[in-house]
Image (cartoon, rainbow, N blue to C red):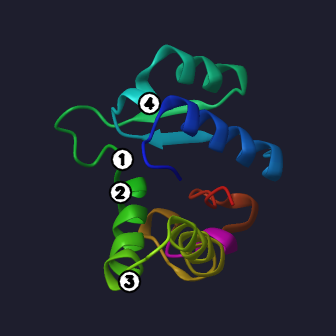
Amino acid sequence: MNKRMTKKLVIEALLKAVKRRKPSKVIIFHSDLGSQYANHDFQNFLLIYEMKSSMSHKCNYWGNAVTESFFSSLKTELIYHNSYQKRYKAKQKIFEYIKDFYNKNLLHPYSNYKNPEGCGNKRKTPKLFI
């Protein structure tokens, strides 16, 4: 997390996640059409790490539904109910939300109503990289 979402921030965060999690399957990176995701450097990064880019198309509101669902849950369950005086506190709470709540508890129809952590090897919805 940072004040601005740049390609450098996105690449560094994804690289950190890949090193930490060491995924054994192909990763599909869902995103919108933001310049930080569509630029040449980021797309090359995905190719180097054999990840597939999944970008919603203009006016295709369902193209990125899984990702949009996550951000909706994050905002309604955590962000809108709190006020943070310091950026590091917000980062800490968001990290805890993803690691301890979202990955363990939230059910999504995309994964047959299983939580991201409970989908095992047949998991369709990947755990968020934390």
Closer to us: 121 or 97: 97
The local secondary structure at tag 3 comes to loop
Image marks 1 and 3: residues in contact by CB distance under 8 Å: no
Callout 1: few (<14), some (14-19), or many (20+) C-alpha neighbours within 10 Å?
some
Image marks 2 and 3: residues in contact by CB distance under 8 Å: no
Callout 2: few (<14), some (14-19), or many (20+) C-alpha neighbours within 10 Å?
some
Image marks 1 and 4: residues in contact by CB distance under 8 Å: no
- Region in magenta: 112-118
- For discs 4 and 2, the disc positioned in front in the rendered view: 4
Closer to the chain start, of discs 2 and 3, is 2
Q: Is residue 25 visible?
A: no
**Quarter-of-image position of residue 74:** bottom left
Q: Which residue is mark 3?
A: 82
Image marks 4 and 2: residues in contact by CB distance under 8 Å: no
- Cα distance in 3D space between marks 1 and 4: 16 Å
Closer to the chain start, of discs 1 and 3, is 1
Callout 3: few (<14), some (14-19), or many (20+) C-alpha neighbours within 10 Å?
few
Q: Which residue is mark 4?
A: 36
For residue 64, which numbered disc appears in the image? 1
Three-letter amino acid code at disc 1? Asn
Callout 4: few (<14), some (14-19), or many (20+) C-alpha neighbours within 10 Å?
some
Q: Which residue is mark 2?
A: 68
Q: In the displayed structure, would residue 78 be above or below residue 6?
A: below
**Residue 111 included in the magenta stretch of the image:** no
Residue at the spot 62% in from the left edge and 26% down from the top edge: 46
What x and y, as percent, mark residue 121? 75, 60
Three-letter amino acid code at disc 3? Asn
Residue at the spot 37% in from the left edge and 27% down from the top edge: 35
**Quarter-of-image position of residue 122:** bottom right
- For discs 1 and 4, the disc positioned in front in the rendered view: 4
The local secondary structure at tag 1 comes to loop
